[in-house]
Amino acid sequence: MVETLPQEPRSSRAKLYLKALIAPLCLTMIAIGQIRNARSSNLSPWKGGGFGMFSNVDRPAVRFLHIYLITEKGEIPITVLPGI
């Protein structure tokens, strides 16, 4: 005689699958929103959620360098040429 395990009702299996999909769907929606914001506005992928910071190649357009020469008369901003 072969014993079989009791089968769960279909509705509870469907609920289990739905629960398993909630986190991936939420993360996907947030990632898509981040990509949209980074491409449609002046938002760096490093900001506004940070999903892009792990997959984005750094480029000069999103890098900011501020140098100031400090003198007795105050701070003088120094211009840095790209690529130097």
Image (cartoon, grey):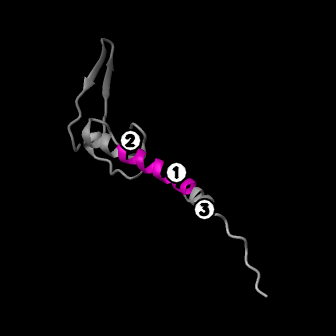
Q: Position of residue 4 (x, y in %)?
A: 73, 78
Residue 76 vertical placement versus 20 (above, below):
above
Q: Which residue is mark 2?
A: 46
Residue pictured at 20% horizontal, 37% vertical = 81
Q: Secondary structure at mark 1?
A: helix
Viewer-nearest of discs 3 and 1:
3
Quadrant, the N terminus: bottom right
Residue pictured at 38% horizontal, 53% vertical = 55
| In this rendering, position of residue 51 left or right of residue 63 | right
Earlier sequence position, callout 2 versus callout 3: 3
Q: CA distance from mark 1 to mark 2?
A: 25 Å
Quadrant, the C terminus: top left
Give 72 or 55, whichever is nearer the viewer.
55
What range is drawn magenta here?
18-34
Q: Which residue is mark 3?
A: 13
Q: Which residue is mark 1?
A: 22
Residue 48 vertical placement versus 18 (above, below):
above
Asked where in the image residue 36 lies, by quadrant, the reply is top left
| In this rendering, position of residue 63 left or right of residue 1 | left
Q: Secondary structure at mark 3?
A: helix
